[in-house]
Image (tube, helix red, strand yellow):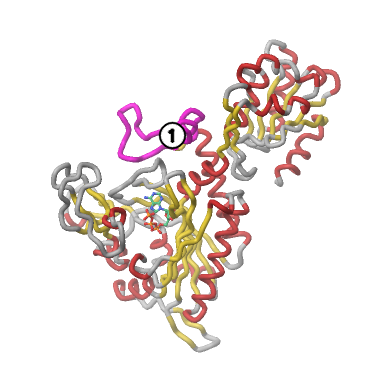
Amino acid sequence: MAKIVSLAKRRGFIFQSSEVYGGFGSCYDFGPLGVEMKNNIKQVWWEEMTKKQENIVGLDAAILMSPRVWQASGHLTAGFADLLVECKSCHKRFRVDELRDSPGTVPQKCPECGGQLTEPRKFNLMMKTLVGPVEEEAATAYLRAETCQGIYVNFENILNSMRLKIPFGVAQIGKAFRNEITPGDFIYRTREFEQMEMQWFCHPKEAKKYFDFWKKERLKWYLNLGIKKENLRIKEVPAKERPHYARQALDLEYKFPFGWREIEGIHNRGDWDLSNHSRFSGKDLRYVDEEKKEKYFPHIIETSGGADRSFLAFLIDVYTEIKGGRAKKASFLFPPSLSLGRTKTTKAAKEIEILLKLDKKIAPIKIAVLPLVRNKPKLVKKTKEVYQILKPHFTCQYDELGSIGRRYRRQDEIGTIFCLTCDFQTLKDNTLTIRERDTMKQERVKISDLTKILEEKLGK
Ligand code: ATP
């Protein structure tokens, strides 16, 4: 993890929030490369859920909602509280479920200092805020702890405005906030995070069938984006560990360096949400099936993933160190025109090279445009022209600093799919080389064909 955290900071993926002030309670900022990569993850998810699947529409609900939403959902009561113990000596708090050796046992000693622990207590995870300038009880609101409640309270609006029929789904990506007791493991568990959720409304009799369907679909999504099969598993959640709203639950878990942990939850929420919102709001949120003459609360299957957790999983999964460097091993792949600069990399080649084999849809930078050397004005001018041609179509980077070998390694380290190099032949015949990240193979192509070729290669 230390290596991932260091790479993330060094190369502009993730910074600690408010770092100049010493940081702020497990909050993180996504840097220039991080925001590209996170946007890509969200984009691929959105396309998968709203474009490729049948009958799923989108929503972007407000973060602040009526506090009554959270009373109805059970989040303000014990249902959304973690059972905690506090050490009487060092006053650190721990989640009981994380300290238990075996189910049912209550931990006795503080894992940090060995001190005596208090009886377990509930601690609510909702973050409070004040809405309006007057500090009074009526103005208390909560930052949403899960994005899906915005979907449930809009169920009728969406149904009527879009003239939908059951079964259908609503997808949403947005920030959620939880006053986590044990945040940590970098961006794995933070107090502010982003969820990618889809709520599938179906007939109660079909809930089990769709639960299985979405389980398979979501697993496929991660695998298709390159997550290694052996690093992904499904954990059925036993009844006593399920969230308060779930009739059936499973966690998609990823094998992080700190252990197997959930990256997405799939839940059968039954009619918990719609029936409670009906009760609390006084509005009948049952679905009317005119054809079958049925009136019922649809059951909800939710797929609830985290943009931050999947970001971390994608990053860790492709992080590869190559001792001694790949360039040396594959020197036969370099055309003679590119041998310049390679001799200078001998020392560097002994170092460890980092390669991020990110999927082409997720990689933050798709193309790097590089002049072979930077002290030849004509070559630099030509390379910048190529960069300008490609910039409107792809996320590109222009880089002229350092030897060509070093620049290739810098790009490999951030997962750039293609490096384009303009050399002296480029000035003669308007061709350049395309170097592919994983194979390091190079091919020479005409600049006039470049956009089309790259579009094909990147599957645009
Ligand atoms: P955990 O107990 O592992 O923190 P959870 O079971 O409370 O998570 P859910 O309520 O099922 O999580 O939330 C769905 C998804 O939202 C999670 O799979 C995760 O990807 C994301 N998520 C939840 N809490 C956090 C958090 N504190 N930080 C980052 N992502 C989170």
Give the camera-side residue of 266 and 447.
Answer: 266
Name the amino acid type tagged 1: Ala
User: Where ligand 1 lies, by quadrant?
Assistant: bottom left
Residue at position x 64%, y 19% in the image: 400
Quadrant for residue 378, please give it. top right
Quadrant for residue 187, please give it. top left
Magenta range: 1-29
Residue at position x 45%, y 84% in the image: 295
- Magenta segment includes 8: yes
Asked if 162 appears above or below 317 in the picture, the reply is below
Query: Can you say which quadrant of the picture contains the N terminus?
Result: top left
- Magenta segment includes 276: no
Give the camera-side residue of 410 and 285.
Answer: 410
Give the camera-side residue of 239 and 174.
Answer: 239
Q: Position of residue 371 (x, y in %)?
A: 70, 20
Q: Position of residue 171 (x, y in %)?
A: 50, 60
Q: Which residue is mark 1?
A: 2
